[in-house]
Amino acid sequence: QLVESGGGLVQAGGSLRLSCATSGFTFDDYAIGWFRQAPGKEEEGVVCNSNSTDGATFYEDSVKGRFTISSDNANNIFYLQMNSLKPEDTAVYYCAAGYCSLSYPNGVRGQGTQVTVSS
């Protein structure tokens, strides 16, 4: 099970940190990441951390340098720190655990949390 929190309304240029609390599986055994879906658009991978020995992490081009994924393995929580937010970042954000297709995390997903960035 994955449960997101931390979404909300923020002005352009602001920051938010999303959290994804996980349970029911061994955290380190799976890739973890975030994807988003804006109104009327398809799902888009934001970031995926393979959790492999090489630690490969894939960011979608539009968020590179602004978003950072991190994790607290001891407590089975991972985060998405979002800085310099733009109106085009407005979407429902989902966390997921499974495997990476570049920046898209496939697998079990949470229920989503809304992020709205006002201009």
Image (tube, helix red, strand yellow):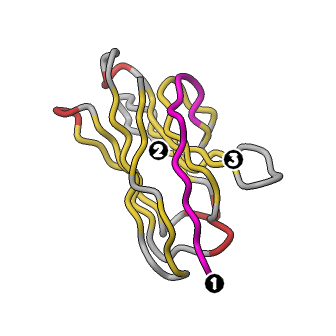
Q: Nearer the viewer, residue 39 or 98?
A: 39
Task: Name which residue lies at 49% across and 39% down.
Answer: 95
- Picture coordinates of residue 13, whole percent (x, y): 50, 82
- Picture coordinates of residue 33, whole percent (x, y): 48, 40
Task: Name which residue lies at 33% across and 15% down.
Answer: 24
Q: Mark 1, residues whose alpha carbon is within 10 Å: few (<14), some, or many (≥20)?
A: few
Q: Is residue 22 left or right of residue 57?
A: left
Residue beneath disc 2: 57
Residue 108 lies in magenta, yes or no?
A: yes
- Give the number of callouts: 3
Q: Tell me the mark number nearer the camera, choosing from 1 and 2.
A: 1
Residue 117 lies in magenta, yes or no?
A: yes
Query: Which label was assigned to residue 119?
Result: 1
In this view, 60 is above or below 42: below
C-alpha separation, residue under disc 1 versus residue under disc 2: 30 Å
Task: Name which residue lies at 36% across and 19% down.
Answer: 29
Query: Which label was assigned to residue 44?
Result: 3
Task: For the C terminus, give its image quadrant.
Answer: bottom right
Q: Earlier in the sequence, mark 1 or mark 2?
A: 2
Bounds of the magenta segment:
105-119
**Type of residue at label 3?**
Glu
Q: Nearer the viewer, residue 68 or 86?
A: 86
Mark 2 secondary-structure assignment: strand
